Amino acid sequence: MPTESASPSAEQLPARTAAVWAALDPLVDTGVALRVLDVGGGSGMFAVPLARLGHTLTVVDPSADALATLHRRAQTAGVGERVRGVQGDGDLLHEVLADDGGYDLALCHSVLEVVDDPAVTLREIAGALRPGGQVSLAVANRAGGVLARALAGQPADALAVLGDRGPAPGRPARRRFTPEALLALVEGAGLTPGAWRGVSVVADLLETASGADPADVRQLELALAEVSPYREVAAGLHLLATRP
């Protein structure tokens, strides 16, 4: 059974992820232990807090270094027995996990931006869920990327992101999504999407420039996450989707 630890949203976690935890809390803080798959979450930012709540985590990540960090963090937190790291790629989950399917919840955060084919990866994740299982998706938002570069005094880069063009030479490629594109991707994987929300509407700007109280920033993030037009210009997008 889950431990009596406080919900992760009540811990001192980054304000920029407040909206994600707010969406996850009703699923993970019910007193029922879940089997959770975290794709690309090798360092354990979400896996370790979830394991502290009593859930069992399988983390799939291509980086051996990230999985080593995961192992250390899980051991330090006293949840090493509930966190398993598996080296592999999200688009080959059927091979990586073999017959270890039927997960209650899957996390796919900041992964679809960098995989070869987001549609393939998301279909693999959908296939690892039990019927009725859910996936938490967090991706970079194109509009937020445009605004961030414009405010940073990089108009040329802002135009490139607006036109979905490739990065400048020497910079890593990173795909960005519109809400419409994310919803279409989810539906194409055979999943039923829930409402989408903005992630880090103002947190990055406030925490960097203003020295604002983190608790106040977190409250503002939660207030803006589901409200238009603010969510449209967030740094990221988040939604929960369900396997029928």
Image (spheres, helix red, strand yellow):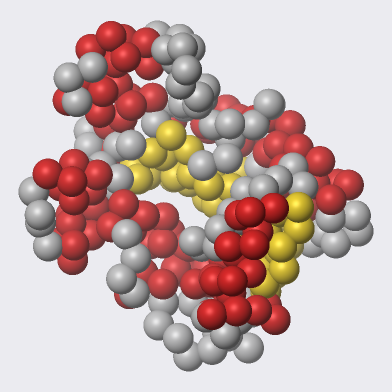
In x, y percent, where is residue 242?
63, 51
> Which quadrant would residue 5 be assigned to in this image?
bottom left
The answer to whether any part of residue 107 appears in the image is no
The answer to whether any part of residue 209 appears in the image is yes
In screen coordinates, is 136 left or right of 228? right
Q: Residue at x 68, y 26 (%)?
A: 116
Q: Name the quadrant of the N terminus.
A: bottom right
In screen coordinates, is 49 left or right of 159? right
Q: Residue at x 46, y 69 (%)?
A: 26
In screen coordinates, is 126 left or right of 201? right
Q: Nearer the viewer, residue 13 or 216?
A: 13
Q: Residue at x 39, y 31 (%)?
A: 141
Q: Nearer the viewer, residue 54 or 232?
A: 54
In x, y percent, where is residue 92?
81, 41
Q: Nearer the viewer, residue 169 or 88?
A: 169
Work out whether 4 lies above or below 190: below
Work out whether 76 lies above or below 105: below
In x, y percent, where is residue 180?
47, 26
Q: Residue at x 64, y 31 (%)?
A: 115
